[in-house]
Amino acid sequence: MDWKLELVVVPVSDVDRAKAFYIESAGFRLDVDHSAGEDFRVVQLTPPGSACSIALMRNPEAAGSAQGLQLVVTDVSAARDELSQRGLDAGEPFHFDFETGARVSGLDPDRRSYNSFLAFTDPDGNRWMVQEAGPPAS
C-alpha cells in the first residue's frame, strides 16, 4: 500500500496576503480557491514540479507555526536566483560541516547532495528550507 503525502496545511493570518506571496514570490501554482459561505475557504497551491501541495488555512493564533517545511531542488543557487528575481529574500546559502556539525556559510564545497540549503519565511513567519539534492556537482 502506498502512503502519499499530498497536502500540508499552512496556518496564516491573512489568506489573500499569503496566496499572493506564494504565487508571486515563491512561484507556486494556484490549484483551488473555493469559498462556501463566509467562514469556509480552501486555497490550495503547489510548488513547481511537486506532487505535494499546501492548503492555506486562516488561523491567526497558529499563523507562523509551520517551521519544518522543506523543498528540494537540484541547484540551490539557481533556486535562490529565481526567488530573488521574484523579490523574495531567501538569505544566503549554507551547509553543515560533516566533522563538527556546525552550520557554515556558503554552499557545500563538494556540492554533496542534501547538504546545501537556503531558507525563507512567508509573511506570517512560516519557515521554509530549500535543500539541494542531485546535480550540479560535476
Image (cartoon, rainbow, N blue to C red):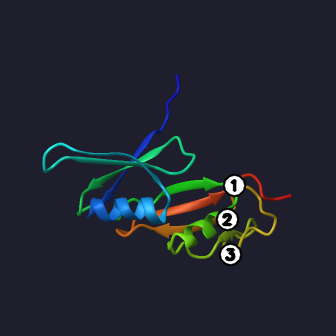
Of residue 98 and residue 110, the one placed in the foreground of this image is: 110
From the top left corner, tell me how far across and down residue 86 is, in percent.
52, 69
Q: Is residue 64 above or below residue 31?
A: below
Q: Count neighbours of disc 3 (C-alpha within 10 A) and say few if under 14, some if 14 to 19, many if 20 or more.
A: few
In the rendered image, which quarter is residue 83 located in?
A: bottom right
From the top left corner, tell me how far across and down residue 74 is, in percent.
69, 55
Residue depicted at 52% across the width and 22% down the height: 1
From the top left corner, tell me how far across and down residue 35 is, in percent.
21, 46
Precedes in sequence: disc 3 or disc 2: 2
In the rendered image, which quarter is residue 115 located in?
A: bottom right
Residue at mark 1 to residue at mark 2: CA–CA distance: 9 Å
| Residue indicated by mark 1 | 74
In the image, farthest residue toward the right: 138
Disc nearest the viewer among 3 and 1: 1
Q: Count neighbours of disc 2 (C-alpha within 10 A) and say few if under 14, some if 14 to 19, many if 20 or more.
A: few
CB under 8 Å between discs 1 and 2: yes
Precedes in sequence: disc 3 or disc 1: 1
Of residue 55 and residue 2, the one placed in the foreground of this image is: 55
In the image, farthest residue toward the left: 38
Give the SS element for disc 1.
loop
- Name the amino acid, label 1: Thr
Give the SS element for disc 2.
helix
Residue 65 at least partly seen: no
- Name the amino acid, label 3: Val
- Name the amino acid, label 2: Ala
Residue depicted at 23% across the width and 63% down the height: 61
**Would residue 64 appear left or right of 48 to someone viewing this image?**
left
| Residue indicated by mark 3 | 104
Residue depicted at 25% across the width and 56% down the height: 58
Residue at mark 3 to residue at mark 2: CA–CA distance: 19 Å
Give the SS element for disc 3.
strand
Disc number for residue 78: 2
